[in-house]
Amino acid sequence: MGVPKDTIVFADSGGFDFSAEEVDTTPEETLDTQRRLDADIYGTIDLPLSRENRDAENERRVNQSTQYALEASNQHNGDGFLFASVHGYDPETIRNNIRYLEKYGDFDGYALGSMVPIRTDYKKVTKLILSARQSTDKHLHVYGLGGLVYQPLLLYLGVDSFDSSAFIRSAGNRNYLIPGFGGEELRNIESLEYLPCPCPVCGERSLDEIREDRTALTQHNLWALATELRRFRYVAESDRNIEEYLDLRFQGNDVTQRAYETAKQQVRRLT
Ligand SMILES: [Zn+2]
């Protein structure tokens, strides 16, 4: 993809494809594929949970994912960092899972999955992520969440990395992401001559050009997320107060403001 040589590549197992079908790989095969991709970080095979599943079925999936992770740990020869994929729809399950994997396996980090089906339930997602964060000091990845709203929330909750196709999906919906604000449908800003973004994509193009070029819009959206990330790092690095920054960042949208307030209460309860 033409990215710089020092770019870190995370190869997950593609677990979400197994949500309906049977698993068609083994921990050993997956490690082999990840090695051949020359990935830096490997995620273990997992069976994502679903809100619609019965509790017993989700419990079976949680246990199966744990077994796959331990098998991968046994097969892992040390090249690449191995992250165990962890699932659970209550904080206890996640905590017990991470402790069990820490005791019986050898992992460089943990990757929390199954958040996508419950993504709009911010309170629950926040609770589950905090329970994972408290269970380990190692690297914590969250699968499938990102975007302009979730990204600052995840950073605030102490998540180390995350993956999201939000920038691609937004571009598909003709949504232009603006750091500090959120998504704006292109048809709402049709008469704007200059774009409100100086990224390498927008800096050289007019709104009309972006409108007609899906790839450019996708690339801009990725820049918008990168900008948001760099800003957060700046706030953390400087003497500024992160909560004050996020108070500003989330004002103006009731839903995300409530999500952030919930997260803040939960974080404060812990400290
Ligand atoms: Zn831009």
Image: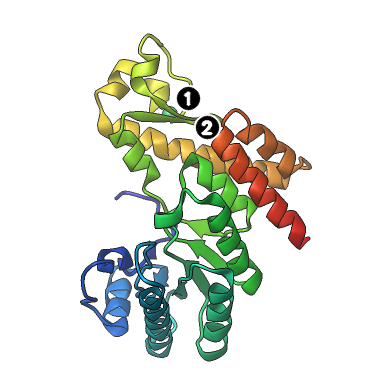
Residue depicted at x 24% and y 23%? 212
131 or 14: nearer the eye?
131
Q: Residues within 10 Å of mark 2 (few under 14, many from 20)?
A: many
Residue 41's spot in the image, x, y percent? 43, 69
What secondary structure is marked by label 1? loop
Can you identify the residue that label 1 sits on?
A: 197
Badge 1, how many Cα within 10 Å: few under 14, some, many 20+? some
* Residue type, numbered disc 1: Cys
In the depicted structure, whether residue 68 falls above or below residue 18: below
Q: Nearer the viewer, residue 153 or 238?
A: 153
Q: Is residue 136 visible?
A: no
Say if disc 1 is inside 8 Å of ligand 1. yes
Figure check: 4 above or below 100:
above
Is residue 77 or residue 267 the one in the foreground? 267
Give the residue at mark 2: 179
Q: Residue at x 50, y 51 (%)?
A: 121
**Vertical position of residue 100 compared to residue 126: above or below:** below
Residue found at x 42% / y 23%: 203
Ligand 1 in which quarter: top left
